[in-house]
Amino acid sequence: MYLNENRHYPKQQIVPAFDGAVPLAQTADLINSVGRYLGWTQFSGNERIDELPQIAVCNVRREVTLLDDPYPPAVFGLSFWLTGYAYWGGLMEARNGAGTSTAVALANQSVPDHRGKRRGVIWSDYMILLKSGSASNGWAYFHFKGSHEVNPVFVTAVTPRSYRGHHRAWTDGSVEWLKRGDFSLHPDDAETGAIHRVGTPALTMYTY
């Protein structure tokens, strides 16, 4: 509905810590842009996860009482929620339509353009890898089975042994389930396994 009326997807915001748009950053601007078509009230950005509309938060993520408050600007330079979803619309055109040098589409066939003229992933379950240089800072996802060791600094899984899989919803209305084994979970293979990379060598986020 938003695309039909505005001829482009809701805009992404730059996350200063990465100098680029980060798919998992669900901001109040994004939620409000979508919400006015769904009859939602407007949100300030200070609400807890359980105060957001049910459809705006992954049901599996709701089972995990972790990071229920929005990330404060002091952490990444922008306040946003960790809803369990990643949003891909306009990902490469976030800054004044020009994108950012730190954002790279690793799989061009999977990233939609800002105006919806190319098929791509529009929403997905949250599935990321954080790296500092060549070193892994851990994985983050919500479809997991069993337990995993947590990196307390980044609140990530040290290894993705508990990863079950995640969904990708495409702009044509199709949804796919990527199960464990459909792509490499080795940190060295992130450049070929992930869809998008953003950040600097000091802190890089790969989204799958």
Image: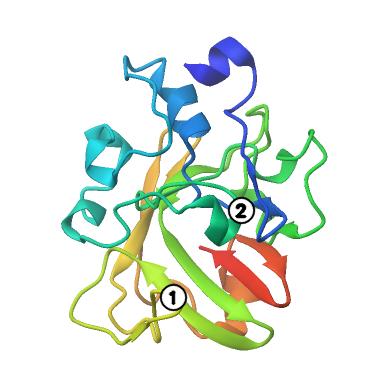
- Looking at this view, is 171 or 28 the one in front? 28
Q: Within 10 angstroms of label 2, few (less than 14), some, or many (20 or more) residues?
A: some
Identify residue type, mark 1. Answer: Trp
Marking on residue 139: 1
Residue 186 in the image: state x and y as whole percent: 51, 85
- Residue drawn 82% across the image and 56% down it: 101
Label 1 and label 2: CA atoms lie apart by: 21 Å
Q: From the viewer's perspective, is 118 left or right of 124?
A: right
Which residue lies at the image location 65% right of the left edge and 58% below the top edge? 107
Element under disc 1:
strand
As displayed, is residue 186 above or below residue 119? Answer: below
**Residue annotated with mark 2:** 77
The residue lying at 33 percent from left, 51 percent from top is 69
Whole-percent x, y for residue 178 in the image: 38, 62
Residue 171 image position (x, y, % from top left): 50, 35
Which residue is rendered at x = 67% and y = 60% of the image?
Answer: 18
On screen, residue 164 above or below 120 = below
Residue 172 visible in the snapshot:
no
